[in-house]
Image: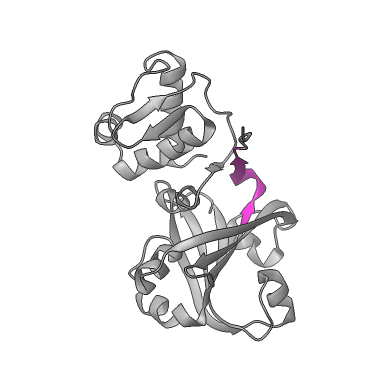
């Protein structure tokens, strides 16, 4: 199962491999590719981010999108996310939609504080949701996500939650007028918790990945924490390491 942008990225990678877009040539503009492929510009943009992260293309203002290599990215099962910037982390919102299950206030006890990496007694708005494929919402969910919004932003997020379809980090930026400066990420393996198995349509105890992200907003305030549980057969994660000369 792949989100639409991943399918577009694969199609473009194959076109590059087959020589339709030779190394050194420029790809057509996003608007032309969107029309040719029958998708939105945001889908093309997300596909470009993935190709750029694998080293197939480079993108420069006033120059365009240049083909840098002919080798396609490695095939991965499920959701493939190549991450090199905050914007590329946020591409997740382009491919999925949020189905909110509940939104409640919480005070972090010792166990929750340890899980989130915060101090006990801190106050948060917890928004629990399923992430579904935007193009195939009937398929098994991508993940279960608990988003914890810091108290300073909780009321603004709560008031606009029903009308927000994108990432909550984007909403926090809009409400506060401040930018996300840093995302601190931790990934660990764990079994699918029995309490989430039915919602995820996965076997309790089967392999899963838990991804915790802490979103730091200017000027250095922890504004949001997300904890997502992905069944192991629906998610792959890739980063690109570059040698510094």
Q: Which residue is rendered at x = 72% and y = 73% of the image?
A: 114
Q: Residue furthest front?
A: 245
Q: Position of residue 214 (x, y in %)?
A: 58, 64
Q: Is residue 27 above or below residue 86?
A: above
Q: Is residue 90 above or below residue 198?
A: above
The answer, for residue 23, to whether it is visible in the render is yes
Q: Position of residue 31 (x, y in %)?
A: 25, 36
Q: Is residue 41 above or below residue 214?
A: above
Q: Main secondary structure of the magenta part?
A: strand
In the image: residue 236, left or right of residue 28:
right
Picture quarter containing residue 174? Answer: bottom left
Total marks shown come to 0
In the image: residue 15, left or right of residue 187:
left
The answer, for residue 161, to whether it is visible in the render is no
**Viewer-proximal residue, 2 or 51?**
51
Quadrant for the C terminus, please: top right
Q: Which residue is rendered at x = 68% and y = 70% of the image?
A: 117
Q: Magenta stretch: residue 223 in it? A: no
Q: Position of residue 25 (x, y in %)?
A: 36, 19
Q: Is residue 207 above or below residue 28?
A: below
Q: Which residue is rendered at x = 47% and y = 51% of the image?
A: 92
Q: How is the image coloured?
A: one colour
- Magenta segment, which residues? 229-240
Q: Position of residue 13 (x, y in %)?
A: 45, 25
């Amino acid at each position: 199962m792949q989100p639409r942008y991943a399918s577009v990225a694969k199609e473009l990678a194959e076109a590059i491999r087959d020589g339709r877009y030779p190394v050194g040539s420029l790809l057509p503009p996003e608007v032309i590719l969107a029309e040719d492929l029958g998708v939105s510009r945001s889908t093309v943009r997300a596909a470009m981010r993935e190709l750029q992260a694998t080293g197939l293309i480079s993108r420069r203002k006033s120059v365009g999108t240049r083909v840098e290599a002919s080798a396609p990215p490695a095939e991965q099962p499920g959701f493939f996310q190549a991450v090199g910037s905050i914007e590329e982390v946020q591409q997740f919102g382009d491919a999925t939609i949020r189905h909110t299950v509940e939104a409640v206030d919480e005070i972090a006890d010792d166990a929750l504080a340890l899980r989130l990496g915060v101090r006990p007694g801190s106050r948060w708005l917890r928004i629990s949701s399923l992430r579904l494929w935007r193009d195939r919402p009937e398929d098994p969910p991508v993940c279960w996500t608990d988003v914890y919004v810091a108290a300073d932003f909780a009321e603004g997020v709560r008031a606009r939650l029903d009308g927000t379809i994108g990432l909550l980090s984007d909403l926090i930026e809009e409400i506060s007028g401040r930018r996300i400066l840093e995302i601190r990420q931790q990934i660990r393996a764990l079994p699918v918790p029995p309490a989430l198995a039915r919602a995820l349509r996965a076997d309790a105890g089967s392999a899963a990945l838990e991804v915790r992200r802490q979103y730091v907003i200017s000027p250095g305030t922890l504004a949001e924490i997300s904890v997502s549980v992905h069944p192991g057969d629906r998610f792959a994660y890739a980063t690109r390491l570059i040698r510094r000369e």
